[in-house]
Every structure is written in C-alpha cells, then in structure tokens.
Amino acid sequence: MYDRFNRRISYLRISVTDRCNLRCSYCMPSEGVKLMNHSDILSYEEIVDVVYEAVALGISKVRITGGEPLVRKGIVSLIEQIALVSGIEDLALTTNGILLADFAEPLAAAGLQRINISLDTLDRKKFRATTCGGELRKVFDGIEAAKRAGLTPIKINCVVRNSSDEPDAIAVRDFCSSNGLEVRFIHEMSLSDGRFTIVENGHGGDCNRCNKLRLTANGMIRPCLFSDIQYSIRELGVRNAINKAVGMKPEKGSVSVTGNFYNIGG
C-alpha cells in the first residue's frame, strides 16, 4: 500500500481510549478535556475488524495507544485477538507505565511483543507535579515487570522542552544506559501551531519516511497527526476509509485544530 508520494504505508497506530490516569501538563490542556461519549468509542470487535482489513491492505506493524491504553477494561483480550491476525510482524503498545507492573506478564502472554514507556524525569517531585500526582516508583516497577516478561526492546519516550542536553533528559539517558533500555527524545510539539521535530533516536516527525495511519478511539482513520484529514470507518466502511486516508496523506504535516495528543495517540 503506497501513498501518492511513494511512501509504503505499513504502520497502524490504534488509540483505544481518550482516558488517562495521569494529567501531563504538555498533553492535557489546563482547562481540562472534553471526553468522548462511551457510545462513540470503538468496540474491540470493531477494532479487530479494522486490523484484519488493514493487514489485508499491507499493514504489518500495529501499536496500541491511548490516552492510556491500560485503563481500558479488557485490553489484554484485545491484544490477544490482534496477535492472532496473520500478517502482523510487530505488535507494540505505548504506556505511561503506572499500571504496567500488573499488566506486563498478561500482555506478553497474550502476544504483545514490545513496549514503549513514557519517562520524562527521574525527580519524583517533578514527576508528580508534571503528571498531576503520578508516582514515579510505579513506572520503575513497570519497567522491571516488562523486562521480566520479555517485552523487549523496551523503549523510553522522554519529552524535552528544548534539548536532550537538559538535566532531566541527561538523567533519563544515563538511567536507560545503565538498565538496558533504549531512549528516544521527543521535543514538545503543538498541533495547532504545527510545531514538531524529528524524534531523536527514532523516526517520528520525519515526513519523508512516514509510513503511518492512525485510528482514533471513535473510529476515524487519520493519515497524519498534523492534519485534520480523517475518514470514519463507521460511515465509509473500513477498507474505503483506509484507502481514502492513504490517497489523501499529505506530503508534510502542517496543523491540526480538531485533534489532541490525548485522543489521537500522539
């Protein structure tokens, strides 16, 4: 499956919920968020149907995101169903790590292959302030549980304000180096201003190499994080929505005023 710029589209990011158990300052607006109605959020059956159609069209990599995917009831069952789809070569999940200690083993047993964990600072007070009450110890426990479960390589997503040479980023880099983890530095982005950069030690933000589609929790296929183009799988059917999204995928992201990181999947 190729777009009009001859990029092979092989990666689907699936947001299973817009809910989260943290309120990170760079993700959640200070005035709060308007959550989706539960009736608008895709059922697991609908999500699995999307995966089957997407794989038939050429998708081979699937990542589960949120919000925070581990807050959605039955997430292990979803992973198990997706893992059974023939043709998926890479099945991953991104989490803030708070609940991971309890979920790592069941997720691995269900067929999850690897995991990304958000970690922006090793300072417990800063972590609590940035996340509005999160406990850093739970993230460390989740990392250790992921190691024991074999969800490797474990990648750490570290958001930085200006530079990966900031003190918090340096501390996270050293922690990862000492613990067999891979770190990626993600500069703070703005959807409405169109501000983004290429992820350090990753490929995100590199429009020339972009191979992604996104499925939002309420059933929209979006070809680009920094675009308002989207197609409803419920209105158009899965295959038609995917084909339209691929056909209209922009060469380069610009801005998005209809989405937020917490409900698109970042």
Image (cartoon, rainbow, N blue to C red):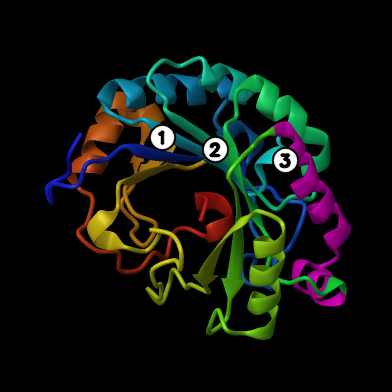
- Mark 1 to mark 2: distance in Å? 8 Å
Label 3 Cα neighbours within 10 Å, binned few <14 / some 14-19 / many ≥20 = many
Note whether 205 is above or below 1 in the view shown.
Answer: below
- Image position, residue 70 (x, y; %): 71, 39
Residue 86 horizontal/vertical position (percent): 41, 15
**Residue in view at x 46 percent, y 68 percent:** 200
Amino acid on which disc 3 is placed: Ala
Residue stretch in magenta: 125-149
Q: Is residue 99 in view from this perspective?
A: no
For image coordinates 50% across by 39% down, the residue present is 63
Which labelled disc corresponds to residue 92? Answer: 2
Do residues under tags 3 and 1 come within 8 Å of each other at their CB atoms?
A: no
Determine the secondary structure under disc 1: strand
Earlier residue among tags 3 and 1:
1
Relative depth, front residue between 242 and 56:
56
The span from disc 2 to disc 3 (Cα, nearest Å) is: 12 Å
Mark in the foreground, 2 or 3: 3
Question: Would residue 75 be counted in the magenta stretch?
Answer: no
Magenta span dominant secondary structure: helix
Which residue lies under the disc numbered 3? 146
Foreground residue among 155 and 216? 155
Q: Confirm or deny contact between disc 1 and disc 2 (CB under 8 A).
A: yes
Task: Look at 30% across and 52% down and name the residue there.
Answer: 229
Is 211 placed above or below 78 here?
below
User: From the image, which quarter does the N terminus lie in?
Assistant: top left
> Is 170 placed left or right of 200 in the picture?
right
> What residue does disc 1 label?
61
Give the residue type at disc 1. Answer: Lys
Provide residue 120's location: percent of width, then percent of height. 68, 69
Disc on res. 77: none
Above or below, 108 relative to 164: above
